[in-house]
Amino acid sequence: MSTAGGDHPADHGAATGQLVRLTGDCSPKHLEEPCVYNRATDELYIINQKALTFLEKCGRGAAVPDSEEGRMFVDFCLGEGILETADEPAARAFSLRRSPVPSLRYLLLHINDRCNLKCRHCFLGEGGAHELSLPEIVAIADQFEDMQGLRLLVSGGEPLLHKDFWEINDYLARKDLRVVLLTNGTLIDKETARRLSAQEVQVSLDGMREAHDHIRGWGTFERSVAAIGHLKEAGVEVSVATMIHRRNLEDFDMLEELVRSLGAREWSVDLPSAVGRLAKNTDLLVDPRTAGPFLRRSFGGAIHEPLAGYACGAHLMAVMADGKAARCGFYAEQAIGSIEEGLEACWQKIAKTPLSDLECNCEFVEECRGGCRFRARGYNKVNGADLCQCYRYGVLK
């Protein structure tokens, strides 16, 4: 999160009256505050209403203002890659309305629940019968964009198995959203990597070869690592997700070295909850005391500055493959509505948890925001902290 107009050198000066327009990756957003979002870099800049109005005009093209303040703002935007000089107007228009408060910034969209693997820790369980239709996905993406959404997280099952995946891929490329594809990576070859339009692909690596293959199937580690190579070669940004389990506790030094060497922009390390298949594979479970310190290994992927005073989930919702909406994928059995009601109607139904409601008040609460609410309920049965975060931050030893 940045504030436009900060102490950046204005070395990209534009003359008064020169035509400037928004770059293709940038769009104005009206969240709790006016902003401009770069979906390529995932950078969100806070601006004022005057700047928002100007940048909206810059979708087509606008002249550099005849004022020092205006020229400084344009120079900043040119330097940040938000604006570019142009000889002719563009044809971009935006659905610019104020978002709900709190804003829905991140939408986890399970387009199907079919998968080519049977991972022993999958929270969805046995799935496989549901798939959102192409018109449903188009409507959801349109509504999310209208609500000023930022990241659309496309998941499954394995999303590449959706019968209309490439039509979905091509449609989402035209949205003012950062599309992040969540995949096990085993179906990504060079041609698939080249065709993907997502700004980011998150591949799961749950340990080095033996540990990863133990829970995802023999040979999957090699295929997933190869997929990351194909994606990087195609110029697609890659992130890696790792779930902590009993078999990979000794792998983290080597795994971190691998993840960094693969050029991942983000490494998300987390502890799965004992639901779905993991509830039947309890030998893989790790307690919060053991898992907590491993969460510190994560890097990159910081969320944009959240609305102050709210616990985890204040800006996230999930849509499941059966069309039900929930707080996140773990709450699928406690759905609050259906996409037939509309995305915004579902979002308004989700109760956001104020930090003041949590039964914890340590010095890190504003940073960890109570951790995963589903996991917190699972371990301590009260509306307190996620114990994994307590051990991560050293509040508990």
Image (cartoon, grey):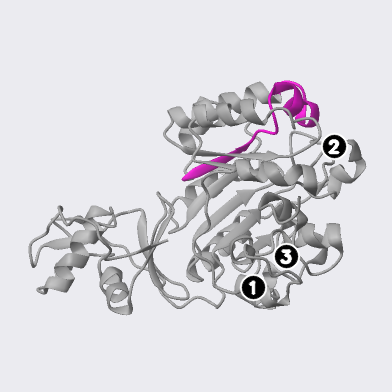
Q: Residue at x 92, y 42 (%)?
A: 280
The image quadrant of residue 295 is top right
Q: Is residue 227 above or below residue 300?
A: above
Q: Residue drawn 62% across and 33% down?
A: 185
**Of the residues tagged 2 and 3, which is closer to the observer?**
2
Q: Is mark 1 on a helix, strand or loop?
A: helix
Q: Answer whether residue 191 is visible to the viewer in this image.
A: no
Q: Mark 1 or mark 3: which comes first in sequence?
A: 3
- Which segment is the magenta one? 199-219
Residue 280 is covered by the magenta coloring: no
Quickly name the residue at label 1: 347
Q: Residues within 10 Å of mark 2 (few under 14, many from 20)?
A: some
Q: Which tag, 2 or 3, sits closer to the chain's start?
A: 2
- Badge 3 marks a residue whose secondary structure is strand
Q: Which mark is residue 326?
A: 3
Residue 136 picture location, percent across and down: 63, 60
| Residue, far front | 397
**Residue 292, image x, y percentages:** 72, 47
- Numbered disc in front, either 1 or 2: 2
Q: In the displayed structure, does residue 39 sit left or right of residue 254? A: left
Q: Residue 284 carries which label?
A: 2
The image quadrant that residue 27 belongs to is bottom left
Q: Label 2 is placed on what type of residue?
A: Leu
